[in-house]
Image (tube, rainbow, N blue to C red):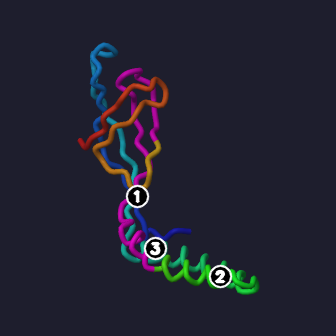
Amino acid sequence: MVNRFLQKLEYKPVLIKHNDVAYVSIDVVQGLYHYTIYSLLGRLVVWLRQTLKLLLLGVALLFIPGEVYFYLIFLVLYIPYGAYVTWRLRIVSSSISGQCPACFGAMTIELQPDERLTLWKYCPACKAPLRISEH
């Protein structure tokens, strides 16, 4: 169970625009941008979970000769890098949902965690180019 103080799911209205006027007469529709905001404590919990998984793997690798040296070097390099990456993990993008202005079908576009608005994407159904920006 995730504590509501660690992360908060939010929605933001966005404009989904299609520039090719040969398809439609209305080329701008509204959609929703789904994202998660992590607090400082939430980011720390994510980092600790990832680091503890690697430490448990390291305990299992202690019994394999020679493997422990490779793992120790990897762990020494990973801990500062993992801390930096999770520190930057304040807003995590999930998806954009709405109506395609080209084919007028309902669509949901999955996003990478580090993608931010303004985006250029394609409609999953008709492959029309879409520009997604803040409202």
Residue shown at 48% from the left, 71% from the top:
3
Q: CA distance from mark 3 to mark 2?
A: 16 Å
The amino acid type, in three-letter code, at marker 3 is: Gly
Q: Which residue is depicted at the point 42% across and 39% down?
A: 97
Q: Which residue is mark 2?
A: 58
Label 1 neighbour load within 10 Å: few <14, some 14-19, many 20+: some
Q: Which residues are magenta?
A: 80-109
Measured as percent of width and height from the top left, residue 108 is found at 46, 38
The relative height of residue 90 versus residue 115 in the rendered view (above or below) is: below
Residue 135 placement (x, y as % from top left): 23, 41
Residue 15, quarter of the rendered image = top left
Residue carrying label 1: 92
| Of the pair 33 and 57, the residue shown nearer to us | 57
Q: Quadrant of residue 64?
A: bottom right
Callout 2 environment at 10 Å: few (<14), some (14 to 19), or many (20+)? some
Observer-nearest residue: 83 or 33?
Answer: 83
Element on which disc 3 rests: helix
- Where does label 3 land, which residue? 82
- CA distance for labels 1 and 2: 29 Å
Q: Nearer the viewer, mark 3 or mark 1?
A: 3
Q: Is disc 1 in contact with disc 2, using a CB cutoff of under 8 Å? A: no
